[in-house]
Amino acid sequence: DTEVTQTPKHLVMGMTNKKSLKCEQHMGHRAMYWYKQKAKKPPELMFVYSYEKLSINESVPSRFSPECPNSSLLNLHLHALQPEDSALYLCASSPMGVNEKLFFGSGTQLSVL
Amino acid sequence: GENVEQHPSTLSVQEGDSAVIKCTYSDSASNYFPWYKQELGKRPQLIIDIRSNVGEKKDQRIAVTLNKTAKHFSLHITETQPEDSAVYFCAARIQGAQKLVFGQGTRLTINP
């Protein structure tokens, strides 16, 4: 298995909802990432987990809460989001040093109403 | 902090011709430079990368060159094909910062 799998592919939520994005990889990668990508823009780093510990938080608002239950799984818990949080949320993993040779998932297209 | 400028923002070439995309970075401590290809509606995919101790790297029709003195690196695609049409992002990683900084992207269109 050489893929990063993300679910759901699409998500519509209201500003008072709580939802979670899920990411899974079975490549033995020990670094996992959450990125946010707006249309026609590059991916923006949100969080990095290295060996299941949060190593980088790019000053992301607390309405986004990451979780790494084990070395294969990464979650992003969403609560009280704003319409401007609508974007493509990409998960990635890497086999080597942090931020090298990233494998991206297909993303979750999130719409906040 | 690190800043990566990418040019051009759009590029249109005839099938079979070459395409060149250039990026300039600001921090001389940057030590790793990947290129990602993102087709419409798809995930970004790493196509080639280079470290700061190497001047050039080639993989079939794709090559990357790095000029550390000038702080710029370029992606070269030869014998372009329609499937090369995509948005290409360069990135730079600052040693110790553990963060990739992406350029703004280049939309490459290959005309048949």
Image (cartoon, rainbow, N blue to C red):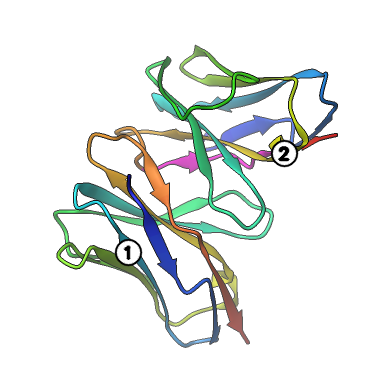
Check disc 2 and report the residue beneath it: A84
On screen, residue B9 above or below A90 = below
Q: Is residue A4 magenta?
A: no
Read off the magenta span: A101-108
Q: Provide the secondary structure element on which disc 1 rests.
A: strand
Is residue B51 in sight in this rendering?
yes
Taking B83 as reference, is B94 left or right? Answer: left
Which residue is at a point 43% across and 41% down the rendered structure image?
A102
* Magenta-colored segment: predominant secondary structure: loop
Tell me how many marks there are: 2
Give, as a three-letter code, the residue at label 1. Thr
Which residue is at a point 50% across and 51% down the rendered structure image?
B45
Check disc 1 and report the residue beneath it: B24
On screen, residue B71 above or below A12 = below
Q: Chain of mark 1?
A: B
Residue lying farthest to the top in this orientation: A69
Quadrant assignment for the C terminus of chain A:
top right
Q: Position of residue B65 (x, y in %)?
A: 26, 68
Q: Position of residue A30 (x, y in %)?
A: 39, 24
Do the numbered discs 2 and 1 sit on residues whose CB atoms are within 8 Å? no
Which residue is at a point 23% across and 63% down the rendered structure image?
B71
Q: Provide the secondary structure element on which disc 2 rests.
A: helix
Which residue is at a point 62% across and 85% down the rendered structure image?
B111
Give, as a three-letter code, the residue at label 2. Glu
Few, some or many residues within 10 Å of mark 1 (<14, 14–19, 20+): many
Q: Chain of mark 2?
A: A
Few, some or many residues within 10 Å of mark 2 (<14, 14–19, 20+): few
On screen, residue B101 above or below A60 = below
Q: Position of residue B49 (x, y in %)?
A: 32, 55
Return the residue nearer the eye: A77 or B61.
Answer: A77
Is residue A28 in sight in this rendering?
no
